[in-house]
Every structure is written in structure tokens, then in C-alpha cells.
Amino acid sequence: MKDTVILTVGSTLSHIDDNSLVAAITQSDIQDIFWIHQAAREINKVRSPAYMVPRGNDDSRYYVVVALSKAFLDQFDAAWRRLTKDGQVRMSFHDEHEGRKPDDASNW
């Protein structure tokens, strides 16, 4: 029982040492973010056509219009909302129509 968290009625939660306390505190953070990390990796594999619209006179900034299919939203709706909540997304652009391999990408 050396590594057991001790909790009795009327007492406070305590840990055997600082390491077990840090493990317990960080576990919830990891559980909260791990699913979104896994979903982002899966979303990165999805290929969709996109249309780029310049943002005013600034040639270095664009709006990117991508149609999200029902199948995509059924699978990734919660993750997509969380990943895009600040209005910015990292995208990988692939030019597969010009004979390039799918791994020849530009990251923006």
C-alpha cells in the first residue's frame, strides 16, 4: 500500500510523495488534450479541395474556403470546433494534380 492514495471520511486527499501528486494533477490535463491530438493527426490525413481568397491588399494573407463533408463532420465535429475556435488553422497544401507525390507539401 506504499503507492496508494489515502482518503478517509473527514480527511483531505493526500499523496505519498510529490511525484504521485504531480502525476495525479497532470493526468487530467493529458486526458483532456490527448483526444484532440489524436483527432488532429487523423484530420491531417484528409485531402479536400480548397479555394483561396486574398484578404484585401495583403498578398501574404488569405481566407481558405474548404467544403466539409457530412462524413467529415460526423467523425470530427467536436474536434474541428475545438481546433478552429480561435479562427486560425494550420493547413498542409498538396498539389497532386501536377504529378507530385502527396508528401510534397507546403505547410502554412
Image: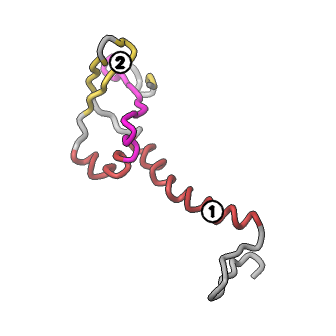
The span picked out in magenta is 82-99
Q: Is residue 94 above or below residue 80?
A: above
Instruction: Quickly name the residue at label 1.
Output: 25
Q: Residues within 10 Å of mark 1 (few under 14, many from 20)?
A: few
Instruction: Quickly name the residue at label 2.
Output: 99
Task: Give the residue displayed 66% in from the left and 83% down from the top.
Answer: 11
Q: Tell me where residue 73 appears, x and y as whole percent.
A: 27, 48
> Is 76 displayed left or right of 2 in the figure?
left
User: Viewer-proximal residue, 9 or 40?
Assistant: 9
The way the protein has been coloured in the rendering is: secondary structure
> Is 15 displayed left or right of 30 in the figure?
right
Query: Which element type, helix, strand or loop, lies under badge 1?
Result: helix
Q: Is residue 61 above or below residue 1?
A: above
Task: Give the residue displayed 46% in from the left and 54% down from the top.
Answer: 35
Q: Tell me where residue 37 appears, x and y as whole percent.
A: 48, 48
Q: Residues within 10 Å of mark 2 (few under 14, many from 20)?
A: few
Alpha carbon distance from label 1 to label 2: 50 Å
Q: In the rendered view of the protein, which quadrant contains the C terminus?
A: top left
Q: Is residue 60 above or below residue 6?
A: above
Q: Is residue 33 above or below residue 90?
A: below
Check whether the beta carbons of the residues at disc 1 and disc 2 lie within 8 A of each other: no
Q: Which mark is residue 92?
A: none
Which of the marked residues, 1 or 2, is nearer the chain's N terminus?
Answer: 1
Task: Give the amino acid type for the residue marked by disc 1 in the picture.
Answer: Ile
**Magenta run includes residue 95:** yes
Task: Give the amino acid type for the residue marked by disc 2 in the picture.
Answer: Gly
Q: Tell me where residue 65 appears, x and y as whole percent.
A: 26, 29
Q: Tell me where residue 10 appears, x and y as whole percent.
A: 63, 87
